[in-house]
Image (spheres, rainbow, N blue to C red):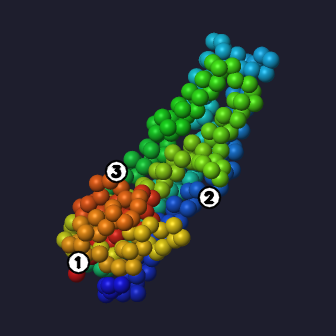
Amino acid sequence: MDEYPLSDEERALIEEKDSLLNQTYEDFFDGWGLLELALFAIIWKYVSSFKTENGKFVFDDENVQKVAGINTVAASAIQQGEYPQKVRDYITAFGRVTDLNSKIQSSVNGMSAKELEELLSPVQRQNVQITLNGLTGAGISTDFIEPMKIGIYRNIVAGATVTDMEVFIRDFIISNEDRLGRFQKYAGQIARDAIFQYDGLLNSLLGEKIGANAYLYVGGLVKDSRPQCIRWDGKGIIKKSELITEIAWANLYGKGMIPGTNPENFTVYRGGYNCRHTAVPVKI
C-alpha cells in the first residue's frame, strides 16, 4: 500500500467522515420494517372501505372516485410516520459532510476557511434541495403512489377479491427476504447514492481547486466489496495518471461500475453503484 504523510488528526478526520457517510446510510434504513407496516395499515384501511359484492370489489363510479383519493391518503400516511424524521436526519448529514471535507482539505492541502466556504456552500444548498425533492417531492408520487394507485384500479376493474387486493397492497409496500417493497426501493436508491455522490462531488471540486494529482481511496471493506474496491483500498493512493488504466481494469475484471466513469468524474462515481468508498484528492 502506498503511503501518504497524513497526521493522526487528518486520519481521524477521514475516518470520521467515512463513519458518518456509512452511518447516515444505515440509519436511514433502521426500523424501515415498522414504517412499511404502518403505511400498509393506513392504506389498507382506506381501500378495504371500498364497495364490494360477494367478496369482490365493484367497478363503479363510487369506487373509481375513491381510488383518486389514494394520493392524499398515501401522502398523509407517509407524513404521519417516521419517514419525515429520517429525511431530516439524512439531510442534516450533508452539512456535516461539508464541514469534515473542509477540515480535511484545510489540514491536508492548506485551503483557507473562506475559499472553502465560497466553493462548497452553493454546492451544498443545491444538492440538499435536489435530494429533498427526490425524497419528499414529486418523485414519491411518480415512483410509489401512482404505480400503487394504478395497481389498485386495475384490481378493481378485474373484480379482484378482498384477499387478492390485500395481498397486492401488502406485497407492493412491505419488503421481504426476496425483494424490497416499492417505497423502500425508491427512497432507498436515493439514500444509497445521494450522500456518497455528494461527498464525491465535493472532492471533485476540491481536487480541481488544488490541482490534485492523486486520490486517497478510503472506506474499508465489507464481505461483498467489489473487486475494484478491494484493489483500490489495498493501493491506498491512486495517482491521477493511473485512473484510465484502473477504470479499464474495473470495467474488465470488476463489477457494478457506472457507465461513463472516467478520470474527471471518478471522485463522484468511485467504485460504482452504491459504492461506500470516498476518494480524497491530494497533491503529491
Q: Disc 2 marks which amino acid?
A: Asp
Q: What label sits on residue 117 in the rendered view?
A: none
Tell me the CA gap for discs 2 and 3. 27 Å
Tell me the CA gap for discs 2 and 1. 38 Å
Residue placed furthest toward the top = 61
Inspect this view and state whether residue 94 appears. Answer: no
In primary-sequence order, the first of circles 2 and 3 is: 2
Residue placed furthest toward the front = 252
Which residue, given by chain and number where applicable, does mark 1 sit on?
A: 283
Asked if the residues shown at circle 1 and circle 3 are in contact, with their CB atoms under 8 angstroms apart, the answer is: no
Q: Quadrant of the C terminus?
A: bottom left
Which residue, given by chain and number where applicable, does mark 2 sit on?
A: 30
Q: Secondary structure at mark 1?
A: loop
Asked if the residues shown at circle 2 and circle 3 are in contact, with their CB atoms under 8 angstroms apart, the answer is: no
Picture layout, residue 239 above or below residue 182: below
Inspect this view and state whether residue 11 appears. Answer: yes
Picture layout, residue 56 above or below residue 196: above
How far from the left and from the top, in percent, is residue 242? 24, 73
In primary-sequence order, the first of circles 1 and 3 is: 3
Callout 3 crowding tier (Cα within 10 Å): few <14, some 14–19, many ≥20: few
Residue at image point 63% right, 18% down: 157
Residue placed furthest toward the right = 54
Judged by depth in the image, the label closer to the viewer, 1 or 3, is 1
Q: Secondary structure at mark 3?
A: helix
Tell me the CA gap for discs 1 and 3. 27 Å
Residue at image point 65% right, 44% down: 174
Q: Nearer the viewer, residue 53 or 201?
A: 53
